[in-house]
Image: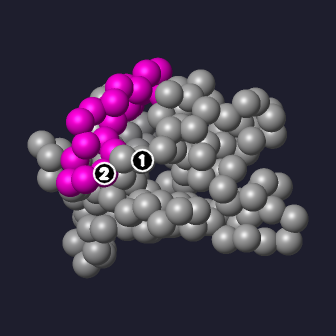
Amino acid sequence: MNWTQRRRRMARRRLLLRCLGGLVGLLVCGFLVGLTLAPEQVVSRQLRLARPPEAIWRVLLDLDGMPMWRSDLVALERLPDQAGGLAWREIGRSGVRVIALTVAEPPHRLVLRRTEAGVPALPARTFELASAEGGTLLTLTERTLVRNPLRRTFNRLHPPRGGIARLLRDLDARLRAGRREVVARPG
């Protein structure tokens, strides 16, 4: 091996080391920025629906019909009431979670919250229904807890909207289908 080949090999090694050092530096900076961000993050989306708030309210509380229109659910099991409100177990692609109805102000505000061992936890979803011209304006807000500082930084740059966007898309498709609604009234 002559000296020009050695120089090229050494230049490639230096470039590789610089790239790896830059990547490690970027990850460390992202981690440090994430430490300064709040662990609780909020994502909100709105959807205008051509139905009155009462019809949307009934669909949101129809536990028996929920697995038929929600694409993220495989099954749903009712549980005994928790703290005086409805509770159910959702079995979906992302695992099993227990959800409790925390606040119900028919037909304007609904708060659903995940529970762990009977204790309220995050994520929490708030559905706010407001009468609008020709229907309802639905605002869905999701509060989540992000423990990983690097993930917090990434979420700040690219907010995750997949879960609530899918839920709104499924709800819109359910309401457009015009199927007969089965009403499950709380307590």
Q: Seen in the image, is 60 located left or right of residue 51?
A: left
Residue 74 belongs to the span the image colors magenta? yes
Q: Quadrant of residue 26?
A: bottom left
Circle 2 Cα neighbour tier, 10 Å, few/some/many (<14 / 14–19 / ≥20): some
From the viewer's side, name the closer residue of 33 and 125.
125
Q: Amino acid at mark 2?
A: Gly
Q: Which residues are magenta?
A: 72-94
Residue where numbered disc 1 is placed? 186
Q: Amino acid at mark 1?
A: Pro
- For the residues bearing labels 2 and 1, Cβ distance under 8 angstroms: yes
Residue 151 visible from this viewpoint:
no
Q: Seen in the image, is 57 located left or right of residue 136?
A: left
Residue 182 visible from this viewpoint:
yes
Q: Quadrant of residue 46?
A: bottom right
Q: Seen in the image, is 80 located left or right of residue 11?
A: left
Which residue is pictured at 27% across the width and 68% down the height?
39
Residue where numbered disc 2 is placed? 85
